[in-house]
Image: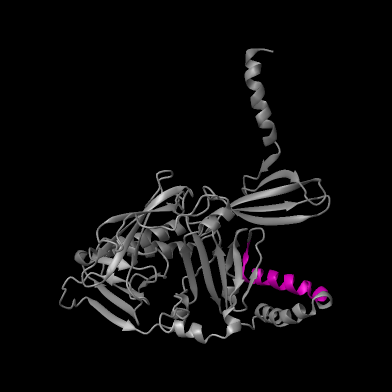
Amino acid sequence: MSADENQTQPESQFQKPGDLVERNDDTGVMSLESLCTNCHENGTTRLLLLRVPFFRDIILESFECEHCHFKNNSVKSAGQIQEKGAKYTLEVENETDMQRQVIRSDTSIFKLETLGIEMPKTDGQMTTVEGVIQNIYESLSSEQPLRKEQAPELHDALVPIIDRLKSMLDREGYPFTVSLDDPTGNSWIAPTTADDVKKYKRRDYPRTHEQNEQLGIAADPNAVQHEGTAEAEEDDIIAGKVYSLPSECPGCSKECFTNFKKLDIPYFKEVYVWGTSCEHCGYRTSEVKTGGEVPEKGKRITLSVENETDLARDILKSDTCALYSEQLEVTVQPGTLGGRFTTVEGLLTEIRDQLRGQIYDIDDTTGSGGDSMASSDKEKWERFFKRLDAAISGEMKFVITLEDPMANSYVQDLCAPAADPQIKTEEYTRTDEEEEELGLKDMKTEGYEQDAENKPADEQQ
């Protein structure tokens, strides 16, 4: 055998397995032989990479065995685990809501909040709200005859739940609330342009160390977790001094440090600026949290932006604050972007960049915004971003409103201590829903000692 033949031999061996993969250039579907787990013969797995508008890339996977006719399909994320988990909440009120697209990863939990039941974790799937409810209904109702014989009490308890699920599927159970919680951030309920804060919510949250362990991305499951005590011997935190806490990087899950500093904002209150920087993967993030007691009422701040001076105003948006502007047609829900201490221009820029990243993928150089985005939607988003760009550059006047149930948000008053004519501030009474979401209904700071003494002996045990 010649030297040239020795060089080409390994190449032919690596090419051979590739012959088992077929690709349809028209549809983009890849097909390959794979083992059937049911009959252990060879079946066919088909893969399709799909870009979902307003979301990200996913892989549709379908398996079929021609020998035993076993079929299976699932959805997997084509990207990496996101830096934060995500929870979506939707109030279903009509047929349009029932047909909203739902993407579930195998780590997500779909819950019917109205009934207090959840769908167990399964393989990822791409379906609709109706499809998930149909799966829950079929799963519960199909085993009712067996429960009636073996567990009659459980059977009777599930009857009203199954009846309510049937009424939902028959379009008679409106309204009801569903949620989708995924620590990987790779699940999704489709939004619409008509959604408001009460109907559709998305909340991003940092994963706990336990969740990172469950996902298999914790740096060291046996590592001792530091509770975070500041590197200082003082009992009180000194304003302007930087403190460091041991932490876990949301990007690579390796050990890093989170720094924070206390600041006193004139005519407002004390705030804490937090920043995390990872030397391993380069991940960086910052957030602002406010200190002090819980106020009795929420606060609504309305600012009229008329020139570049207004764009340069300092603005603090806490993580409990909602932001909206009718002129810009922008609504930012509580929890989105986290806490931010920046300028009006800086905040609008962050909103624009986040929305652009969700609608036009980073690698989407054509600006198509996804495989199935309608032309009318493309035109609408193009107009939206042009208007937002004009506002950021100071070419148009607009009004923004910060609504914070915890009164932890702030807009710089250029006329302080006198009243600023471009700022309107008003207090409002929190709704029961806001009190519940903030956990204030369960919080009691006075008289709890007496309640403990008056508690019956059996409850104390």
**Quarter of the figure with residue 231:** bottom left
Q: Residue at x 62, y 19 (%)?
A: 7
Residue 395 visible, this angle: no
Q: Nearer the viewer, residue 210 or 30?
A: 210
Residue 215 visible, this angle: yes
Principal secondary structure, stretch drawn in magenta: helix
With 261 as the anchor, is 212 left or right in this view?
right
The answer to whether 377 is drawn above or below residue 428 in the figure is: above
With 362 as the anchor, is 73 left or right in this view?
right
Residue 136, position as x, y percentages in the image:
69, 71
- Colour treatment of the image: one colour
Q: Residue at x 51, y 63 (%)?
A: 86
Residue 147, position as x, y percentages in the image:
80, 75
With 54 as the anchor, is 230 left or right in this view?
left
**Quarter of the figure with residue 184:** bottom right
Q: Nearer the viewer, residue 118 or 40?
A: 118
Q: Residue at x 49, y 50 (%)?
A: 253
| Magenta stretch: includes residue 87 | no
The answer to whether 284 is drawn above or below residue 22 in the figure is: below
The answer to whether 279 is drawn above or below residue 428 in the figure is: above
| Magenta stretch: includes residue 140 | yes
Location of the C terminus (image quadrant): bottom right
Residue 159, position as x, y percentages in the image:
73, 81
With 289 as the anchor, is 217 left or right in this view?
right
Q: How many marks?
A: 0
**Quarter of the figure with residue 233:** bottom left
Location of the N terminus (image quadrant): top right
Q: Nearer the viewer, residue 94 or 154?
A: 154
Q: Residue at x 71, y 82 (%)?
A: 163
Range shown magenta = 126-147
